[in-house]
Image (tube, helix red, strand yellow):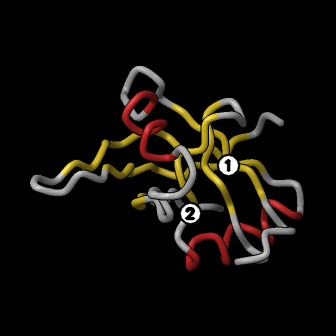
Amino acid sequence: MFQPITTKLARVTYYDCQDNIRQWGCPDIGTYALVREPNNPHDINAVRVSLFGIHDMGYLPKNHAKMLAPLMDEGRTFLADYVRRNEYAPYENVGLTVRIVETTWH
């Protein structure tokens, strides 16, 4: 049985992630999709965290992606639940902490 994982997202400064976290990284959203990227040239185990498959929030850290990628490739489904937005003064960048849970719907 899969035990939920709480983690900070990686690669939150790429593409539109900073803007997306500022706009969509909140408790009202609640849940994000995990999108497998087996053809990602930087990491064959890449798992992107996204809202509606449109608004990228970041990626799972490599150690978690390496564990989850084979499970997702087998057809298991996971979601990322909002935990908190990470903001630390005086830094300008924001991050997102999520809780990865397995779901039964596809």
What residue is shown with label 1?
A: 34
On the picture, is 31 further left or further right than 40? left
- Quick one: quadrant of the N terminus? bottom right
**Above or below, 12 relative to 18:** below
The answer to whether marks 1 and 2 mark residues whose Cβ atoms lie closer than 8 Å is yes
**Above or below, 70 relative to 87:** below
Mark 1 neighbour class, 10 Å CA radius: few under 14, some 14 to 19, many 20 or more: many
In the rendered image, residue 82, in percent from the top left (x then y), is placed at 43, 39
Task: Give the amino acid type for the residue marked by disc 1 in the picture.
Answer: Leu
Query: Which residue, as the protein is rendered here, is positioned at the far left?
Result: 90
Mark 2 neighbour class, 10 Å CA radius: few under 14, some 14 to 19, many 20 or more: many
- Quick one: quadrant of the C terminus? top right
Q: Residue at x 54, y 33 (%)?
A: 31
- State the separation of the CA atoms marked 1 and 2: 9 Å
Task: Give the amino acid type for the residue marked by disc 2 in the picture.
Answer: Leu
**Front residue of this view, candidates 50 and 81:** 50
The disc placed on residue 75 is: none
On the picture, is 104 further left or further right than 8? right
Q: Residue at x 88, y 55 (%)?
A: 75
**Above or below, 98 relative to 14:** above
In the rendered image, residue 21, in percent from the top left (x then y), is placed at 42, 39
Provide the secondary structure element on which disc 2 rests: loop
What residue is shown with label 2?
A: 60
In the rendered image, residue 86, in percent from the top left (x then y), is placed at 27, 49
In the rendered image, residue 74, in percent from the top left (x then y), is placed at 89, 63
Provide the secondary structure element on which disc 1 rests: strand
In primary-sequence order, the first of circles 1 and 2 is: 1
